[in-house]
Image (cartoon, grey):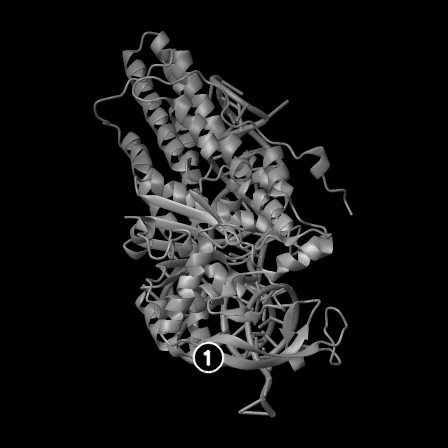
Amino acid sequence: MTFYLTTAIPYVNAAPHIGFTLEIVQADALARHKRGRGEPVRFLTGTDDNSLKNVKAAAAEGVTVEELVARNAALFEGLRGPLDLSFDDFIRTGSDPRHRPGVEKLWRACEQSGDLYKKHYEGRYCVGCEQFYAEADLADGKCPEHGVEPQLVAEENWFFRLSRYGDRLKELIISGELRVEPESRRNEVLSLIESGLHDFSISRSRARAHGWGVPVPGDPDQVVYVWYDALGNYITALGYGSEDDAPAPDFDRWWTEGDRRVHVIGKGIIRFHAVYWPAMLLSAGVRLPSDIFVHDYVTVDGRKIGKSLGNTVDPVALAGTYGADALRWWLLREVPRVGDADFTVERLVTRANEDLANGLGNLVNRVVSMAWRYRDGAVVIPDTLVDAADRAFAEVFDALPAAVGEAVADFDFRAATGAIVRAVDAANRFVETNRPWDLAKGEKGGSLVDGVRLDTVLSLLVHACRVLGAELAAFTPGLAARVAEQCGEGTTVAPAAPVYPRLEVAESDRVTAA
RNA sequence: GGGGUGGUAGCUCAGCUGGUUAGAGCAGAGGACUCAUAAUCCUUGGGUCGCGGGUUCGAGUCCCGCCCACCCUACCA
C-alpha cells in the first residue's frame, strides 16, 4: 500500500517555531512507521513562498522578497538534520520550477470545467493588514489593528464556483472516501459544508499582490490567490503539469494510482484542505486526497506562540540542547489528540527522563549488562516456553507491533508511544519478578535449573528490547538505532553502554520564578 | 452573532455506543531490591468528574441553561 504524506507548507515570513515542528514530526513519524513496515512511502514538505505575508515581512526588514524567502526557506529545510526528519522531497512554491506550470494547469482545468468566472468585488481593505475587513469588524470604521481607516477597494477578481460542490463533498466525507481525523474535525467540516458554501475569490490584482506570485493564465493583471497556488504544491511536487503534459510517473504512482494520500495540517487551515482543495480537484478532474489529519496547536508556557509575545521557541536550539529524540518524543507522547498542548522545557526534560532514560534506557542497560556479566554477551534462545508467565510476557511483545500499528493508523501518536512505554514497564517488572542475579547465584552454587532459567529470562528480555528498538524507530530514530545496535541480533549482544543518558534543564532555560 | 472543541486527582491526560466501590503516569508518603543511568519494583494518601437543572432503576458518559479557555466563521433580522 503506497503512502504519500504531506505537511502544510508554511509561509516563510519568519524562522520555524515549535508549532510547525509538531506537524512535521507527526508526518515524519508516519513516514518512518510505514517505511519500517515495508510500505512504499513518499514524504513531502516545503514552503509557501508566494504568500503576501512574505512580501510584508521583507518590506519590514528592508530586503527583497526573494532574499527573505530564500533565507527562511533554508531554515525550514534545515530542520531536517536537527530534528532527524526523513522527508523525501522539499518544494518551494516560489523558486521551484515544477510548481508554476502545475498551478497553471490546475487553473486551466478548473476553467475548462466552467468553474472560474470574473466578478466585481468591493471591500474595505487595510493595507497594513493586507486584508479585507467586514464593516462589523471595524472599530469606529477603522482597522482594529492599525487604527487606520481602510480604503475602499473595488476590483475585478476571479472566483471559483465552490457552491457547486457542497453536496459532493459532503457525500465524500460521509462515505469516508475523504477521511478527516479526528472525528470532531470531520463533524466540523460537515457542519461547515451544511451551512452553505460560497464561491471564493482566487485571484488578486497584480498591484495589490505587489507583483508577487503566479500570474493568472491569460490574465496577467491578476495573480493567483495564494491558497489556490499553495494547495497545488501537493500535486505539482509530483510533476502534475510539468513540461506541457510530459509523462509524470510520480504523479501517477503516488497520487492518481496511489493508495493513500495523506495531508497533515493544523486546525487553522481545515477549510482550505477539507473544502476548497477537494473542490478544486473535483473541478479539475484530479483525484482527491484520502486522509486529512488535523492537529491542534502547541502553546508555550501557557501562551499562544507569537513573535510579539517573545515566547517563540527555536526548535533547532532545543534539539541542539536536548537532542532530536527528546523533542520528538515530547511532541508525539504528550501532545493530546484533541486540544492544544502546552510546551515547557521542564516537561520535555521530565518526559524524556521518565520514559527514555529511566524506562527504556535503563532497561536496555541492565539487560545487556547482565547478558555480559553472566553470559559474556551470548544469548541462549530456548526452544519452547513452558512457563505461563514467560509466555504472557512474550505475548506482550508479540502484540506490540500490531498495537502500535493500529494507533498510528488512527493518527493517535499518544496511544502508540503509550503502548511502547507500557511494554517497557512490563519488561522492567519482568526483571524484578525473575531476579536474574539470584538465578546467577543459584547457578554458581550448582543449580542447573537456575542456569537454564537464567538463559530463558535473559533471552526473553533481549528479545523484548529488540522489539522495542524496532517499534521506537519511527518516533525516536537516534535512540532506536542505538538500542538496535546494542541489542544486536541472533545470539549475541553488543557491549553495554547507556543508550539514553538523563537530561538536565539547561542553565539558560531555567525560568526565574516570577 | 452563529458553529465547534475542551473544562476529570497538585501536574499531564485515559475514560467507545449510559451500569459494579471513577482510572494511568508524574509529583507526595512508606517500603523492597542491587542487574542497571541515585535507576527499578511494591504499597499508599489524594477527586462535589466546571456550575445548575432534567431524562433514567442508574450519568463523568444523554438533554437544557449558564460560566471559563481556545478555535473557526459571519453584513442578512
What residue is drawn where x is 49% and y is 62%? A229
Residue A9 to residue A314: above or below: below
Q: Position of residue A286 (x, y in %)?
A: 33, 63
Q: Amino acid at mark 1?
A: Ser
Tell me the residue that label 1 is attached to. Answer: A195
Circle 1 crowding by C-alpha within 10 Å: few under 14, some 14–19, many from 20:
few
In the image, is A421 to the left or to the right of A142? left
A295 lies left or right of A138 = left
Q: Position of residue A27 (x, y in %)?
A: 45, 48
Instruction: Classify residue A280 as left or right of residue A344.
Output: left
Question: Which residue is found at the position 76% from the left and 44% from the top?
Answer: A513
Q: Examine the image and state in which quarter residue A439 appears.
A: top left
Q: How many marks?
A: 1
- The answer to whether residue A36 is seen in the rendering is yes
Which chain letter matches label 1?
A
- Would residue A293 be seen by someone viewing this image from the given angle? no
A462 to the left or right of A156: left
